[in-house]
Amino acid sequence: MLADQLCSQGAELIKAMGTVISGQERVLEELLVAVIAQGHVLLEGPPGVGKTTIVNTLAALSSCDFKRVQFTPDLMPSDIIGNNIFNFQTSSFTLKKGPVFTNFFLADEINRTPPKTQAALLEAMEERQVTIDGEAYFLDKPFIVFATQNPLEHEGTYPLPEAQVDRFIMKVLVSYPERSEEKDMLLRFHSGNCAGGAIKALQPIMGKDTWLDFQRKVQAVVVEDSILDYLLDIIKATRQDHNLVVGGSPRASLALLKCAKAFAALHGRTFVTPDEIKRMCFPVLRHRIMLKPEAEIEGLTPEQVISFILEGIEVPR
């Protein structure tokens, strides 16, 4: 019953998002999986491919509050989490909540702000709370961080520390659309249907409580011992691969399991198969493994290494 509901709701969401976004079905599917799995997403792609629009559209269709912050070198932690402001009329401090108090928080170009400000998100991502002047404040549910990066520019950027990168459940690559998809986008714009206006015209097709319900019930998806062993064999292989300096952490194992269960439910299945594990390996592991310098010189990519690893591991029947 849950799988059928998730499958139909997911298909409806992707179809509705298609009225604003041309193509990018793989990206949309992976974002839905991440939200169901209660994980944060690192979106990487060149400028102008619609990363912000995708998240904004998803929030509008699911009645979720959406806030976006442009990360810049002068951004301070208090600009994200908020601070206490002294009220001269009442002679007391009043909490001014920052934009992190939302459901979908978009950290745009997260690698353009210094580590001090990047670290302000760590507690929110891991604990779903922030601490201001020694007092903890819980965030709304669901709470998902979507962070964007431009892989083409490195000057004036601050690469995220590995510990923070590991807290993103998946890294989703947003590429250029196909020719037919880009033409469809041009025709929409030519007819006066711009993305901003289209998003404002969207009607929610589900509530944020539905996300919470899906997040709870997806735990019922069945995972056989043989599938767990297959998952562990993959993670172990990343730690032993001669092309890698760093393999998948235990957090990677948990992320792969959660995403595989969410992906199975999203496609109407009540159990996880090896295909779900394989499909989720790429977005879950590509940002967690680190290539050796000699492997990079040879032109290897994380995706190629993951493919080699999957080819060398026996698939359970």
Image: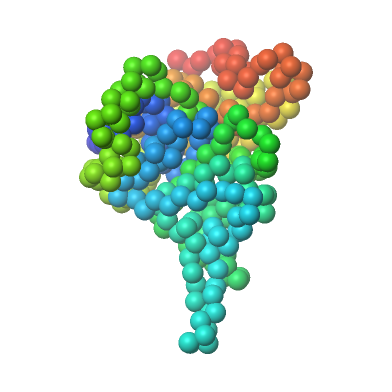
Location of residue 81 in the rendering, given as x and y in whole percent from the top left corner: 54, 60
Location of residue 72 in the rendering, given as x and y in whole percent from the top left corner: 59, 49
Up/down of 311 relative to 45, above or below: above
Location of residue 255 in the rendering, given as x and y in whole percent from the top left corner: 52, 36
Which residue is pictured at 40% across the width and 18% down the height? 178
Q: Quadrant of residue 245?
A: top right
Q: Quadrant for the N terminus, please.
A: top left
In this picture, residue 266 sits left or right of residue 108: left
Nearer to the camera, 171 or 276: 171
Up/down of 68 relative to 218, above or below: below
Q: Quadrant for the C terminus, please.
A: top left
Which residue is pictured at 70% across the width and 24% down the height? 291
Say whether residue 14 is visible.
no
In this picture, residue 245 sits left or right of residue 221: right
Location of residue 301 in the rendering, given as x and y in whole percent from the top left corner: 63, 19
Which residue is pictured at 64% across the width and 50% down the height? 73
Count of marks placed on residues:
0
Which residue is pictured at 51% across the width and 15% down the height? 315
Q: Quadrant of residue 24?
A: top left
